[in-house]
């Protein structure tokens, strides 16, 4: 049923250092393990994934441009760009498919001055925060449900 579906799993700055970076907030798993788990779970639903991580904001924006009409769903953890990148906001606004914003840590309970605010939430269809790897699984489950409800028709995609 989900054949031909593609989900993009995108990560922004500093998330390449997952596993060694602040494990109390971000857990012990590295990015490769996180991506593998997500890709495997998606595959079990017959969905293919594109994964991408960068520490360069422009590269992430260009990747979003490239994928904006090519995927059926996007899961993105932009790292600190979440809190101030209006360029990222504007790029995500042009994504045709549903977008899920995921944060490993609970940004709503962290540094009040800057980390609690996300400038991209209003252009995302769902925000999941503070659930670690479970948050990614929840994002996938939410997208699968949407696909099954027929709300993201692959024929609308242009490649
Ligand atoms: C993060 C939260 C951000 O505030 C932080 O800059 C990150 C990771 C998270 O997954 O909890 O890099 O997005």
Image (cartoon, rainbow, N blue to C red):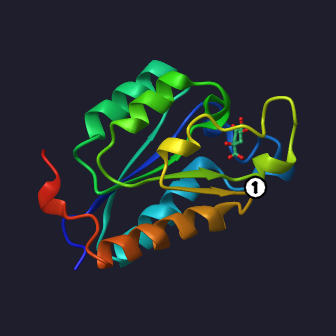
Q: Quadrant of ligand 1?
A: top right
Check disc 1 and report the residue beneath it: 28
Question: In which image quadrant can residue 68 be found?
Answer: top left
- Under circle 1, the secondary element is loop
Q: How far across and down, in percent of the image, does residue 125 sit?
A: 48, 55
Total numbered labels: 1
User: Which of the image's four quarters has the C terminus?
Assistant: top left
Residue at 41% in and 27% down: 61
- Say whether residue 52 is left or right of residue 62: right
Query: In this view of the protein, can residue 56 be seen by the observer?
Result: no
Relative to 90, 13 lies left or right: right
Is residue 91 toward the left or the right of residue 87 in the image? Answer: left
Residue drawn at x 76%, y 55% is 28
Q: Is mark 1 within 8 Å of ligand 1?
A: no
Residue 113 image offset from top left, x and y in percent: 86, 29
Picture quadrant of residue 136:
bottom right
Height in image: 114 above or below 100? above
- Quadrant of the snapshot with the N terminus: bottom left
Q: Residue at x 31, y 72 (%)?
A: 147
Horizontally, residue 11 falls left or right of residue 45, namely right
> Percent from the top left, x then y, of residue 37?
52, 65
Density class for disc 1 (Cα within 10 Å; few <14, some 14-19, many ≥20) is: some
- Residue 122 location (% of width, % of height): 54, 43
Report the residue that reaches farthest toward the front.
Answer: 122
Is residue 127 placed above or below 141 in the rendered structure? above
User: Residue 41, can we see it?
Assistant: yes
Front one among 51 and 152: 152
């Amino acid at each position: 049923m989900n054949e031909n579906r593609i989900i993009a799993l995108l990560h922004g700055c500093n998330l390449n250092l997952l596993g060694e970076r602040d494990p109390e907030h971000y857990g012990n798993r590295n990015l490769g393990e996180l991506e593998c788990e997500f890709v495997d779970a998606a595959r079990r639903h017959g969905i293919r994934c594109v994964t991408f991580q960068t520490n360069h904001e422009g590269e992430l924006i260009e990747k979003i441009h490239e994928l904006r009409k090519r995927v059926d769903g996007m899961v993105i953890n932009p790292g600190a760009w979440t809190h101030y990148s209006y360029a990222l906001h504007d790029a995500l606004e042009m994504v045709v498919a549903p977008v899920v914003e995921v944060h490993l840590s609970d940004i709503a309970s962290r540094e009040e001055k800057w980390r609690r605010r996300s400038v991209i939430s209003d252009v995302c269809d769902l925000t999941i925060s503070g659930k670690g790897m479970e948050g990614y699984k929840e994002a996938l489950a939410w997208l699968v449900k949407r696909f099954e409800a027929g709300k993201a028709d692959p024929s609308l995609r242009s490649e």
